Amino acid sequence: MHPSALVGLLAFAAAASAVPTEPRQAHSSSSIDNLKSNVKNVVVLVMENRSVDNLLGGQTIHGLDNPINNGPFCNPYNVTDPSQGYHCTTAKDYDSVTDDPSHAVTGNTMEFFGQWTPDNAMIADGKLVPNNNGFIHEQIHNHGATANETVKAMLAKQVMNYYTEEQTPVMTSLVQNFLTFNHWHSDVAGPTDPNRFAVVAGTSAGHGSNDHTFGTYAFTQRSIFQQLGETNHTWLNYWDIAGGTGPEAHWFAWTKATNNTNKVVPMTQFHADAANGVLPEFSYLNPSCCGVGTTSMHDSGLISDGEAFIKQVYESLRASPQWEETLFVLTFDESGGFHDHVPPPLAIRPDNLTYTEKAPNGEEYTLEFNRLGGRIPTLLISPWVSKGYVEQKGTSHHGQTVSYSATSILRTLGYLWDFEPFNPRVESAASFDHLIRNSPRKDAPINLPTPQKFSSKMRK
Ligand SMILES: *[C@@H]1O[C@H](CO)[C@@H](O)[C@H](O)[C@H]1NC(C)=O
Ligand SMILES: *[C@@H]1O[C@H](CO)[C@@H](O)[C@H](O)[C@H]1NC(C)=O
Ligand SMILES: *[C@@H]1O[C@H](CO)[C@@H](O)[C@H](O)[C@H]1NC(C)=O
Ligand SMILES: *[C@@H]1O[C@H](CO)[C@@H](O)[C@H](O)[C@H]1NC(C)=O
Ligand SMILES: *[C@@H]1O[C@H](CO)[C@@H](O)[C@H](O)[C@H]1NC(C)=O
Ligand SMILES: *[C@@H]1O[C@H](CO)[C@@H](O)[C@H](O)[C@H]1NC(C)=O
């Protein structure tokens, strides 16, 4: 038997035992009715820059395709010169990566295709598929082109190695108690802001870098904030006043034109609103970024600071009078240049926009937004999801088996709050309405474990 067939069987066995609710079909009216009658508040928290194989690489739960279950996975130091050696995934021995892996669109092409300027026609035809082979090459190119072997080995570990269950006790508890997606990708094979934009608008509006337009009220695309505002649903964009990510609500012309700028409020209010049972229907949470002491899990910060933040958000929700009608979506913006072994699939273009930049080989590369970025950790946390369940691929409205992505959130919220998909990417996305059970669980932990601080000598 092919190893991947065995993984599939294991995943099926785990799934079969873990879903004590009748199976539903995504996009079906019974599934949508069930979602609408049980979920009243949605909380979305978008963390920073982690791949599945990085943050969840050491989770032993069945059905998660990661290094500890199915690896090790290896990358060469140099994609064109195998004689320079390889590094294979193994557990991390330090936290925090000061050498931020490349965030550019063409950094992504090197990481996923092993070349800076892959042939777009061949990609679109499915003749050129990602080999996920260039993560170390890119990291060395960026941070250690002239470095010695010791430094190169450290750079390789930075992008390839994974966190263990013991190093990430908060994530481990969430994976074991709630629902984790095995095939959830970032929407844009590029950096932070385009991906954050895609979470709330279903496109990056043709942007492929963290350019200065973000942070101004420049964008005219329809956002989830406008959609809910125009249909009298309540929302707030809670953000960590230390800054560093978003606030996404301030990126849209609509927010300013309609005097909704005051719907961006400090995170402290989130905890108070949860305690008082007055969270809006839609809460969008921005963590702080990016160094030690910030909360987003950005690579230059500490995983334990991010875990402390997630624990606070969870415990506030769990203690809230609104818990029994809450769905908490914990996700990331993109995979941050960290290795993941699952090739990102093609995807429907959201619009006709493209983005062009000059690659390190001197050639121009145009991203057509017809493929997804790397796999990112995403969990559904709620009394309405099954315990320790790993979801595999989803289903589009057209019945195709597809990977999930940020637009899956907009697709599902459209069912919950009666709105049409914003664009073709959202229209074709897998929804997750069918993962909501028909009775709430009473066994969700009140508290999560204390985050594990790595010893300082393990930091780099
Ligand atoms: C990670 O996040 C930072 C801050 O938002 C961003 O500048 C950078 O592009 C991201 N890194 C990657 C690899 O995308
Ligand atoms: C990879 O190897 C080739 C062939 O030896 C060399 O020309 C190139 O500079 C190397 N690239 C890096 C990033 O070390
Ligand atoms: C490798 O380079 C680093 C950084 O420049 C240096 O600290 C270290 O001593 C070097 N190691 C060897 C074995 O040359
Ligand atoms: C929203 O509320 C306003 C004021 O009560 C009302 O005029 C409007 O029709 C409502 N819109 C929708 C879509 O329900
Ligand atoms: C926004 O606020 C300004 C100043 O208070 C006011 O003049 C304007 O009419 C308001 N616009 C809307 C759409 O409510
Ligand atoms: C893209 O352009 C084509 C050709 O002009 C047009 O038919 C199509 O509707 C456009 N798609 C979107 C999403 O704007």
Image: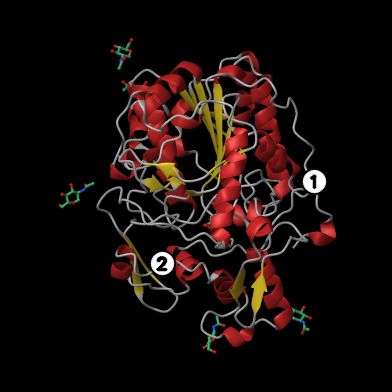
Q: Position of residue 336 (x, y in %)?
A: 55, 57
Q: Position of residue 96 (x, y in %)?
A: 70, 57
Q: Is residue 224 visible?
A: yes
Near mark 2 (Cα within 10 A), the count class, few <14, some 14-19 or many ≥20, is: some
Protein image colouring: secondary structure
Location of mark 1 (residue): 452
Quick one: 366 or 27, which is closer to the camera?
27
Task: Answer left or right for 451 relative to 121.
Answer: right
The secondary structure type at the circle numbered 1 is loop
Q: Residue at x 50, y 42 (%)?
A: 246
Establish if 361 lies above or below 199. Answer: below
Residue type beneath disc 2: Val
Residue type beneath disc 1: Gln
Q: Residue at x 81, y 53 (%)?
A: 454
The total number of labels drawn is: 2
Residue 129: numbered disc:
2
Of badges 1 and 2, nearer the viewer stands 2
Q: Position of residue 239 (x, y in %)?
A: 56, 34
Residue 94: numbered disc:
none
Q: Residue at x 53, y 79 (%)?
A: 79
Task: Answer left or right for 376 relative to 155.
Answer: left
Whether the residue carrying mark 2 lies under 8 Å from ligand 1 is answered with no
Establish if 146 lies above or below 229. Answer: below
- Residue 288: quadrant of the picture: top right
| Mark positioned earlier in the residue sequence (1 or 2) | 2
Establish if 52 lies above or below 356. Answer: above
Q: Does the residue at mark 1 contact the one at mark 2 (Cβ under 8 Å)? A: no
